[in-house]
Image: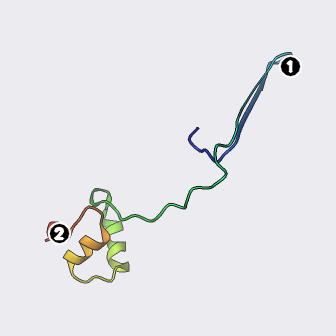
Amino acid sequence: VITPYARFGLRVSTLSERSTLALEYARRSDEMPPSPSTIKHHPSSVNLELLTSLLREGKERELVKFLSKELSCVSMPLAK
């Protein structure tokens, strides 16, 4: 089961209701996973519209600093 914190049940009956199949998958965990964190955009997934938006919202005015801080997998030496 992909979601160990969920409970799934399935009940299937025949048309005459003489046979019923019931499956139940119980929870394997009572704790919810932590909320996902925000990640940086990968350079290959950035289009012009997103790049424009990132440039407007970003505080960096130098291109090298902007690329290394706003995009994943872009280090300062790579941006230069």
Of label 1 and label 2, which has the lower sequence position? 1
Q: Mark 1: which amino acid?
A: Glu
In what element is the residue under mark 1? loop
In the figure, 60 relative to 1: above or below?
below
Give the x, y percent position of residue 19: 82, 17
Residue at the disc numbered 2: 79
What residue is drawn where x is 33% and y is 83%? Answer: 59
In three-dimensional space, the C-alpha distance between marks 1 and 2, rounded to whole angstroms, equals 67 Å
Image quarter of residue 14: top right
What residue is drawn where x is 54% and y is 61%? Answer: 35
Image quarter of residue 1: top right
Q: Mark 2: which amino acid?
A: Ala
Give the x, y percent position of residue 38: 44, 65
Give the x, y percent position of residue 44: 27, 56
Q: Position of 74 compared to 32: left or right?
A: left
Q: Position of 12 compared to 56: left or right?
A: right
In the figure, 49 relative to 21: above or below?
below
Q: Which mark is residue 17?
A: 1
Give the x, y percent position of residue 32: 62, 55
Q: Which mark is residue 47?
A: none
Indicate the colouring scheme: rainbow
